[in-house]
Image: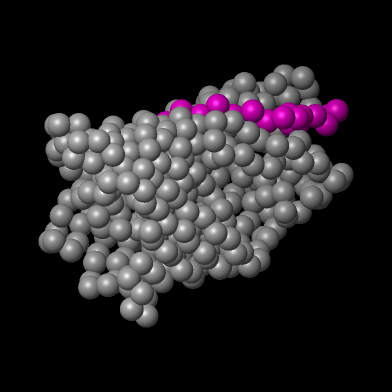
C-alpha cells in the first residue's frame, strides 16, 4: 500500500495509546472529527500544481507550497459479545500516528485467541491527478486522473501477542496514459513507460514496551509494484521505527523510516536503470482535555519526506506542519 503524500495528511492528526492496547471500543456508536490548519510544501516533477512546462528532462523540480485547512473524521459501531465486533469508516488513529493517512470502510472482529481481524476497502487512496505525459519538454503538460481501489487485511495482536501483520492490494489505472509520446521516442519506449498496474504491500510490526507509558514499534515492509511498462515496475524494501510516549495529558509519537526501491528494467527515456532511496520523519502530538473540555484535544504534527533517485527527474521532497482541534464522541 502506498504511503500518502504528507501534503494530503493535513486532513487529520490524532492518536491514542489505547489504540494499540484496546483495538475495539465501547458498545454503540463512537467517532471523532478533526479540524486542522497547516502549511505544506512539495517538490516533484509529478506535482500537477507545480511547473507545467519542462525546459529539460534533466531539470530539477520546482517547489510548490501553501496553507491548507480541512476537516476529517471517523465513525464506528461496536457490538457483539464482549464488544468484539465493529463496523467503521474513516481514518485510523494508529495509521495517522505514524504518518499514513487513508480513508477506510471496514469491519473488524476480535477472536477468542486475542487476534483482531480487520478487513477494509480504501476507495480513495489511489485517486490522484497526474500528467498525461510527464516527460513532455517545451510544451504545457496536460493532466489526467489516476484512480483505483485498494483492499486491506490487518491481523493485530496475533494470538494475543504484540505482533501484527498488514496486507494490502491496489490496482492503478491512469485514464489517459501517453508517457513518452513525443515522436523522438520509439513505440517500445512508450510501452516500457506505461504506468497502469498493481501494488502488493506487506508490513510486519511488533510493540515493545519500555514502561507503562512508553513503547516502540519497529516494522519491516515490502512493496511490489507491477506495471504494464517494465521500466515502471519495482520491488521496495523498507523499515520504520516508531516511539510512543505518554506524559499525563500529553502524548507523542515519533516515526522514522527508510525505503529502497529497485526497478525491474532500464528506463529508456533516461537511458539508465532507476533506483530510489527514500527517508521520512514524522512527529505527532496530542494534548487531551484542552481548556478542561473532556472530549476536546489540541493536535499537531510535522512531517518531512525525501526521495533521492539514480535519475534526477524523479527526486522528490515534501514537508508539512499542522495545528488543529480534535473532538471525540
Q: Residue farthest to the front?
A: 28
Q: Position of residue 122 (x, y in %)?
A: 49, 36
Is residue 182 in the magenta section?
Answer: yes
Q: Is residue 173 left or right of residue 218?
A: right
Establish if 183 lies above or below 48: above
Report the label total. 0
Which sits in the foreground, 111 or 130? Answer: 111
Which region shows up in magenta? 165-184
Q: Residue farthest to the bottom?
A: 291
Tell me what residue is drawn at x 54 percent, y 59 percent: 71
Establish if 144 lies above or below 44: above
Establish if 204 lies above or below 65: above
Tell me what residue is drawn at x 72 percent, y 24 percent: 189
Q: Position of residue 105 (x, y in %)?
A: 46, 37
Tell me what residue is drawn at x 76 percent, y 54 percent: 51
Can residue 134 be seen from the camera position used here? no
Can residue 289 be seen from the camera position used here? yes
Tell me what residue is drawn at x 57 percent, y 56 percent: 7
Amino acid at each position: 500500500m502506498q504511503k500518502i503524500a504528507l501534503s494530503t495528511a493535513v486532513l487529520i492528526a490524532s492518536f491514542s495509546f489505547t489504540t494499540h492496547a484496546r483495538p475495539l471500543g465501547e458498545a454503540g456508536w463512537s467517532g471523532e472529527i478533526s479540524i486542522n490548519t497547516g502549511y505544506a510544501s512539495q517538490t516533484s516533477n509529478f506535482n500537477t500544481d507545480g511547473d507545467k512546462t519542462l525546459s529539460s528532462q534533466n531539470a530539477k523540480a520546482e517547489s510548490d507550497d501553501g496553507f491548507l485547512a480541512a476537516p476529517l473524521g471517523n465513525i464506528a459501531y461496536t457490538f457483539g459479545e464482549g464488544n468484539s465486533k465493529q463496523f467503521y469508516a474513516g481514518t485510523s488513529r494508529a495509521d495517522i500516528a505514524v504518518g499514513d493517512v487513508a480513508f477506510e470502510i471496514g469491519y473488524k472482529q476480535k477472536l477468542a485467541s486475542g487476534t483482531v481481524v480487520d478487513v477494509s476497502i480504501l476507495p480513495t487512496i489511489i485517486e490522484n491527478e497526474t500528467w498525461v505525459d510527464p516527460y513532455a519538454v517545451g510544451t504545457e503538460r496536460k493532466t489526467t486522473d489516476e484512480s483505483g481501489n485498494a483492499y486491506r487485511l490487518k491481523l493485530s495482536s496475533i494470538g494475543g501477542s504484540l505482533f501484527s501483520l498488514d496486507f494490502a492490494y491496489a490496482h492503478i489505472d491512469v485514464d489517459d496514459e501517453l508517457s513518452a509520446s513525443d515522436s523522438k521516442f520509439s513505440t517500445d519506449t512508450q510501452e516500457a513507460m506505461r504506468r497502469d498496474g498493481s501494488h502488493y504491500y506487506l508490513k510486519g510490526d511488533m510493540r515493545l514496551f519500555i514502561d507503562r507509558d512508553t513503547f516502540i514499534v519497529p516494522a519491516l515492509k515490502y512493496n511490489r509494484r507491477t506495471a504494464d511498462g517494465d521500466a515502471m515496475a519495482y520491488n521496495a524494501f523498507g523499515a520504520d521505527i516508531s516511539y510512543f510516549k505518554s506524559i499525563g495529558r500529553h502524548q507523542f509519537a515519533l516515526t522514522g523510516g527508510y525505503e529502497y526501491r529497485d526497478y525491474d528494467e532500464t528506463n529508456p527515456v533516461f537511458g539508465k536503470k532507476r533506483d530510489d532511496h527514500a527517508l521520512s520523519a514524522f512527529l505527532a502530538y496530542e494534548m487531551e482535555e484542552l481548556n478542561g473540555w473532556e472530549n476536546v484535544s489540541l493536535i499537531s504534527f510535522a512531517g518531512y519526506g525525501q526521495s533521492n533517485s539514480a535519475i534526477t527527474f524523479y527526486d522528490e521532497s515534501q514537508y508539512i506542519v499542522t495545528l488543529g482541534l480534535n473532538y471525540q464522541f
